[in-house]
Structure formats: C-alpha cells, structure tokens
Amino acid sequence: MSSKQENIRLHGDKIKYIYGIADNSLILGQRLGELTGHGPTLETDIALTNISLDLFGQVRSYFQYAAQISDGEVTEDDLAFLRTEREYLNVLLVEQPNTDFAFSIGRQFLFDHFHILLMTELQKSKDDTLVAIAKKSIKEVNYHKRFSSDWVKRLGDGTEESKEKMQTAINDLWRFTDELFHTTEADEAMIKAGIGVDVKQLKDTYYKNVSEILEEATLDVPELKYFQKGGKKGIHSEHMGFILSEMQYMQRAYPGAKW
Amino acid sequence: MTEEKVHIEKELEPILRKIPDPEIPVLSILDLGVVREARLDGKKASVKITPTYSGCPAMDVIGDDIVTALTQAGYEAKVDLILAPAWSTDWITETGRKALEDYGIAPPMDASADKRALLGEEKLVKCPQCGSTQTHLVSQFGSTACKALFKCDDCQEPFDYFKCLI
C-alpha cells in the first residue's frame, strides 16, 4: 500500500474511532435527557440532566473535530442527527432504557467507571485534539462517577426494596459490560498509531473498581459467562431505533432547523 | 495560576470587562477567566475563549456578546473557542470570588478541600448569607453545570456553591 493510501485509511479509521467514543456519550446523554422533568426527586432530576449536558458538550467537541477532519461538507449536527442506525458505534450498555431509577443509576455507574479510565488513558494520545478533549472531560466525568457510585451505595446499602432494585439493575446490565473492552479494526489501527486507547488493558482495573463499590454497597458482584455485544459494530438492541427516531425527528422533519 | 500567560490587549480590556457572564451577571467574563486571549491588529480584534464546562450553554451567548460589544466599539471582531488548556476554577480572579460571594454563591475552594466538602467529610463551605460553616451538601449538581447545591444548618437558607474544577 502506498503511503498516500495508508494515510487515507488511517484518516477513515480515526473518524470511526471518534464515533466509537462520542456515540457512547451521545446516546447516554439522550437517555438521561429523557428524565428531564421525570426524575424521582428534583435534585436527582437536575443531577442526571446536568450529566447529560456535560456529555453532550463533550460530544460536540468530538464531532466538531470529526467534521473538521472529514472530507466534504459535514457539520457536527449532521454527524449527531443524520446518520443511520448502523452507523452509530456506541456500546449496547448506553442505549438501555430508564426502566427505573436503579437502572438509570446502574447504567451510569457501569459506564462512568469505564469512562474515567478511558479519559485517563486518552490524555496520553498522540492526537492533540483528543488529548485536549480528554483533559477537559475527565474533570466532569469525575463528578459523574462520584454521583453514580454514591447512589449505588445508598440504594444497595439502603432499604430491602432499594437493595433488591439495585441488585436487579446491576444483574441485568452486567451482560453489557464486556463489550466496553472490545476493539474494532479501526480501534486497533488507532492503538497501533499511538492515537487510540487499548481498552482491553483497562478491563481488570475496571472490574476491580466496580466490584469494590458493589461490595461496599453490600451488593453481589454478578458471575456471568455470557455477554452481549454488537453496538460497537453498529448492530444495536431494539431500543436504538426508538432513541434515534426521537432524537433525529426535528432534523429529519425540518432539515437544517436551528435552535 | 496561569493568569500571567493570558494576553489581553489593553485597549480591549475595558470593553471585555463590561461583559457579564449570562448565568452569573455579577461576574465579568474576565473575572471568570474564560477569555484566554484578546489581540488587536489595526481594527481587527481576535478573542479566544474557553468553556467552563464542555456543555456550558453560556458559551455561545458569551461569544455573541463579545462580537456585539466589540462591533459597537468599532472593531471587526472574531471569537474562537479553544479547549486547551482546560479551564480551572483557579482562573476566577479575587475580584470574581468576592463578587460571587456577595451575590450569594459560595466561591470554589482548592481541590482537596472541595473533595472533603462534597463528600461531606468536613464542614468547609461557608454560607454566603450568614457566614456559618455549619452547612451540608444537598446535591453535587445544582442550577447550572458549574454549581452544587448546599443548605445552611444555621440560617436554613439553601445556596449555590461554585464547584471546584482543577
């Protein structure tokens, strides 16, 4: 392969790599946004939507960068709103519904502990823009992690009912955690280029950190051998279509509509 | 503090100083520390701003306000958003901290004190209404992305605490 072709391929891989990170925050941010005005208490409502806002802010930085390095005239909004389901590369975990408060917290907790490790490592990337985004984001993610971990402990070590609900949520969501540490071809190319994070290396630390908090919350750490995957390759759960139809509605119905 | 590295053209300083943060109107954007550079080339002003939080909805408004103020003053203005280095609460000036407190928002502390306070380990956040440190955290997330919600156990008033971000 000539060096020019090689460069073009790496370029495409980088854009896919950015989707892989940004789509997690986008879809989780959308899920949390659903709780606006519907949180169980005013404080948790505000907290979850604040987290949503942080995630959307991070997504904007990623998509502005992806749009800037893409060929042709694409904008950050095109990337957020006009791709098809198969083109979104988020993990299955983030698209899981807000079944109840314990599920929203469990999903957040299982994602935050991954997110913080990813942002820590991304700061060592050879790509300056990704480093800048990671340095900015990690400060926010620290607050998210503290919030979700506190709630896991409060619900787990709370009443009989709250404990049961928290345990159910963790048991149900656990099967989506393994996918966080899978890599796609684009990921591997970026790891090789010194730009991407090798998430496979984060797995042990992740399960150790998560298990410690679950134990502190007097919850059982699920023992599971079978895990779900697909989102990273664009193969999503049935929930994804519903999320996108709501999220994309305005831009599909009124193309180019501005706030 | 990296305050000394920030280059603000003398001629532009008074104009920028008059622009308030849209969510905390007592605070000038200069005292908030979001203006990272303001340069002048003839009548062309170029300003660089950085967001407090990634999703801070005030950034677009701040950018527009800067363009409007500079245009009215007869400059041709351009505003760019930069991400690095990431904003820190350390960049809020002393004047800014005082303005926050007078306005009823407890100003941010240093990182380790902030952590102890937010985790509820120590009573460190001072009530901006009565000055008591007998306060407790109600929620780590408050009315805007940059604030946590506290309540004073002495005067019973709820108040915002500007979260530390380092």
Image: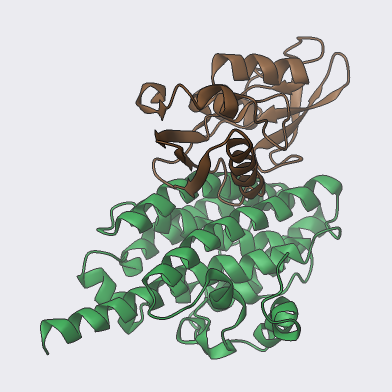
Q: Please identify the residue farthest to the top as the structure is shown.
A: B131
- Residue at the image point whose x is 65% and y is 62% from the top: A106
Q: Quadrant of the N terminus of chain B?
A: top left
Vertical comparison of B3 with A231: above or below? above
Q: How many numbered circles are shown?
A: 0
Vertical comparison of A86 with A148: above or below? below
Way the structure is coloured:
by chain
What colour denotes chain A?
green
- Residue at the image point whose x is 35% and y is 26% from the top: B5
Asked if residue B153 lies left or right of residue B59, the reply is right
- Across and down, in percent, residue B6 comes to 40, 28
- Residue at the image point whose x is 16% and y is 83% from the top: A4
Asked if residue A122 lies left or right of residue A76, the reply is left
- Across and down, in percent, residue A236 comes to 58, 87
Vertical comparison of A20 with B149: above or below? below
Asked if residue B11 lies left or right of residue B116, the reply is left
**Residue B127 seen in this snapshot:** no
Q: Which chain does the brown colour mark?
A: B
Q: Please identify the residue farthest to the left as the structure is shown.
A: A2
**Residue B56 seen in this snapshot:** yes
- Across and down, in percent, residue B24 comes to 72, 31
Q: Nearer the viewer, residue B145 or B12?
A: B12
- Residue at the image point whose x is 74% and y is 61% from the top: A102
Vertical comparison of A162 with A229: above or below? above
- Across and down, in percent, residue A93 comes to 58, 73
Q: Nearer the viewer, residue B55 or A142?
A: B55
Q: Please identify the residue farthest to the right as the structure is shown.
A: B156
Q: Nearer the viewer, residue A190 or A258?
A: A258
